[in-house]
C-alpha cells in the first residue's frame, strides 16, 4: 500500500498516478477540504481521486509512506506518524531543498529504511470556478530515489558496493519493492546510487529558478531573459564552489547549462516558491538558498547573491505576517 502524506501538488499527482494505474493508495492531507478531488492528466484525461483520509492506522513493513512536504513541515508530520511506523515501513522524502534527511534521522533513527527522492514531474494545484480543488499534471519528468544507508534495507556492504541505477535482483527486496511501487504509480522511477549528488544537482536548479521567479513574479521561461544573466551565473558559481568544497565534482558551465535547460523545458510553469509567495505562504527559501548559504559558511565561502535573494524572499514573507497582524 502507498501512503501519501499531504495534499499538495506533487503528493496529489502521485495519488492521481496511483489511481490511474491501479496502485492501492491512501492520501492523508493536513486539511481534507483543501485536498484535490480530481486530476487533469497531460492528455486532458480527468482522474477522479478517492476520498482523502484523516487518521491512519499502524502500517505494515511492506507499505511505503511518501512525504512530499516542505522541509519545514517534516518534523511535525514525522512526529505525528511515528506511532504508526512501528513496523518500519519504507519512508520516502520527496521535497525541494535540503535538510530533510537530517530531520528524519533525528526522529526515526539512523537505521530506519529511509529513501530520498527528487522528481522533475510538474504539477499545479488550483481551485476551479465551481470551488472544487484539482491538480493539473503540467509536465512529464522522472523521479530518482536512493538510500543514504542501503544496509537499513537489509543490504550487506558487499552488495551495496555493486548496486546500479537499474532495478535488478541485486537490490534488497524491501528497497526494490518501494521503488517498484512508486514507479507503478508515477513512472518512471529510477534507483540512484549517488542520491546526494542528484539532490545537490536539483538544489542548483532550485536555487536559481525559485527565488528569481518568486521575486520577479514570472514564469520559469523568463529566467532565460538576458536581464538575469549575471544573477544566474553568480548563483551557479556560488553553488559550484560550495558543492565542490564538500567533495562533489560539478562543472560551473554544466550547472548553468542544466539550469537553462530546465527553465526552458518547464517554461510555462510557475515555480513552487512563486506559488508560495503569490498565495502568501511560507516558502522553502531556508531549505534551498538558505541551506546553500549555511553550508558555504562552514567552508568559508562567500555567497553574496544567494544571501541577497534569501533576504529579499524573507522580507516579502515578513510583509505577509505584518499584513495578517494588522
Image: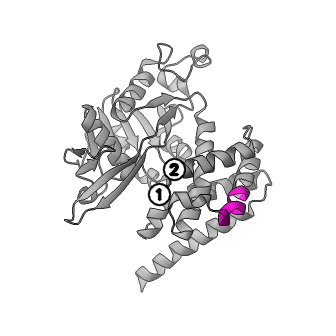
Q: Residue at x 58, y 19 (%)?
A: 160
Asked if residue 55 is among those painted magenta in the image, a careful observer would answer no
Q: How crowded is mark 1: few (under 14 residues within 10 Å), some or many (20 or more)?
A: many
- Between marks 2 and 1 in the image, the one whose residue lies nearer the viewer: 1
Where does the N terminus fall, quadrant-wise? top left
Q: Is residue 79 visible?
A: no
Residue linked to disc 1:
272
Dot placed on the residue nearer the N-terminal end, 2 or 1: 2
Q: Is residue 69 left or right of residue 198?
A: left
The boundaries of the magenta stretch are 226-234
Q: Which residue is drawn at 50% across and 61% down?
A: 219
Give the quadrant of residue 65. top left
Q: Is residue 144 left or right of residue 2?
A: right
Circle 2 SS class:
loop
Q: Which mark is residue 96?
A: 2
Residues at marks 2 and 1, CA–CA distance in whole angstroms: 9 Å
Q: How crowded is mark 2: few (under 14 residues within 10 Å), some or many (20 or more)?
A: many
Amino acid at each position: 500500500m502507498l501512503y501519501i502524506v499531504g495534499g499538495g501538488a506533487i503528493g496529489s499527482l502521485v495519488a492521481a498516478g496511483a489511481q490511474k494505474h491501479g496502485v492501492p493508495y491512501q492520501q492523508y492531507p493536513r486539511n481534507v477540504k483543501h485536498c484535490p478531488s480530481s486530476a487533469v492528466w497531460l492528455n486532458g484525461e480527468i482522474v477522479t481521486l478517492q476520498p482523502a483520509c484523516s487518521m491512519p492506522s499502524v502500517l505494515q513493513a511492506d507499505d511505503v509512506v511518501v512525504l512530499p512536504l516542505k522541509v519545514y513541515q517534516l518534523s511535525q508530520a514525522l512526529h505525528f506518524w511515528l506511532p504508526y511506523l512501528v513496523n518500519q515501513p519504507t519512508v520516502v522524502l520527496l521535497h525541494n531543498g535540503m535538510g530533510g534527511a537530517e530531520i528524519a534521522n533525528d526522529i526515526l533513527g539512523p537505521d530506519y529504511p529511509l529513501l530520498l527522492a527528487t522528481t522533475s514531474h510538474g504539477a499545479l494545484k488550483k481551485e476551479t470556478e465551481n470551488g472544487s480543488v484539482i491538480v493539473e499534471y503540467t509536465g512529464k519528468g522522472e523521479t530518482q530515489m536512493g538510500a543514504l544507508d542501503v544496509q537499513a534495507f537489509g543490504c550487506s556492504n558487499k552488495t551495496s558496493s555493486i548496486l546500479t541505477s537499474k532495478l535488478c535482483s541485486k537490490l534488497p527486496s524491501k528497497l526494490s519493492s518501494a521503488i517498484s511501487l512508486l514507479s507503478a504509480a508515477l513512472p518512471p522511477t529510477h534507483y540512484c546510487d549517488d542520491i546526494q549528488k542528484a539532490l545537490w544537482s536539483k538544489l542548483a536548479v532550485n536555487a536559481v529558478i525559485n527565488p528569481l521567479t518568486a521575486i520577479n513574479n514570472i514564469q520559469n521561461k523568463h529566467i532565460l531573459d538576458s536581464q538575469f544573466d549575471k544573477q544566474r551565473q553568480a548563483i551557479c558559481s556560488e553553488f559550484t564552489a560550495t558543492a565542490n568544497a564538500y567533495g562533489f565534482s560539478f562543472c560551473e558551465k554544466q550547472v548553468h547549462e542544466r539550469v537553462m535547460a530546465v527553465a526552458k523545458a518547464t517554461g510555462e510553469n510557475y515555480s513552487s516558491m512563486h506559488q508560495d509567495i503569490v498565495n502568501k505562504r511560507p516558502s522553502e527559501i531556508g531549505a534551498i538558498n538558505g541551506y546553500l548559504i549555511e553550508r558555504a559558511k562552514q567552508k568559508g565561502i562567500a555567497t553574496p547573491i544567494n544571501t541577497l535573494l534569501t533576504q529579499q524572499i524573507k522580507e516579502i514573507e515578513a510583509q505577509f505576517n505584518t499584513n495578517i497582524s494588522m
